[in-house]
Amino acid sequence: MMNPKISILLAAFAILGLFELFHSEPQFFYAGLILANLILVFTLRTLPDQRFRSPNYWRLLILPLLFLNSAGVYLSLLTNKILIHFLIIFTVLFIYSYLRRVYLYQVYKHLHIDLANITSLGALLIIFFSSTSLYGLRVSLHFPIWVLVLNLLILSTLVNYKVFWVNGISAKKSILFLLVLDLIMIEIGWALFFLSFSYIVLGVILTICYYIIIGLTKFHLKDTLDARRLKFYLGCGLSAICLILLTAQILFY
């Protein structure tokens, strides 16, 4: 079996090449994205203690798989070449960092490697990339809203499950909150379809809402939610939404 460190590095270069390929040659978009997914699936399989039949393998795969695909779709909507190349490099570096951290998590368990922080960052970016893409597809291709909301529901469920799991919150304890979070995300996401802002603004707003909701829920389930954290999430989140709405025409048009 290939050395995990080498397989992670080779996977990063392969995904970089595929992203650059379907950026310059759009007809290879679907084939390139499928191949990138397969590379990711089998690269994670090369890491220690990872088997296709293991539940932990699929739990660990959720984040990079959703990140890869949401970033790929989001990139297809961009036109600024500098931003496109920057996001391609960022996507590859994030996936490399995540796989590297999973490897360290599996091998050096005595060091108590934490996956929570990189998972939280990845979850926010997945919501941003995917929601922005969904709003963009509605504008450009006129997809039915219910189809896009259904995709948002699936993404939200998987991302929230991964966040709860990596923070050590049991499924039994979190199942009700998972359902409530999905319902809130659907309602907010659906309502935003009827606003006249650009798809980027709508994606940013939904991401901020998600940041507030998942942060408060996570700390509540871990019994660490206090007044300071409540004020921080509500204050920063609502202030950011107001700022986005006030400056949307300047920043995003």
Image (cartoon, rainbow, N blue to C red):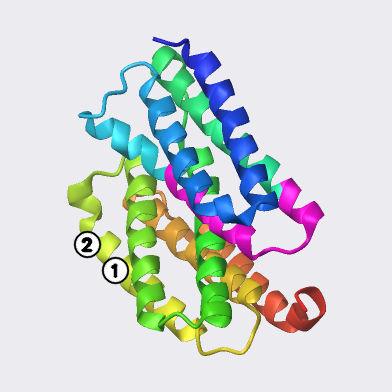
Point out the stretch of residues depicted in magenta: 65-86
Please say whether residue 126 is visible from this viewpoint: yes
Where does label 2 land, which residue? 176
Where does label 1 land, which residue? 180
The picture quadrant where one finds residue 21 is top right
SS type, badge 1:
helix
Q: Please tell me the numbered disc located at residue 123.
A: none
Residue at x-position 37% and y-position 35%:
60
Residue 48 picture location, percent across and down: 36, 16
Residue at x-position 40% and y-position 67%:
152
Tell me: residue 127, above or below residue 13: below
Tell me: residue 209, above or below residue 98: below
Disc 1 + disc 2, Cβ < 8 Å:
yes
Please say whether residue 66 is one of the residues in the magenta stretch.
yes
Residue 92 picture location, percent across and down: 61, 37
Q: How many labels does the image show?
A: 2
Q: Would residue 46 appear left or right of 231 to someone viewing this image?
A: left
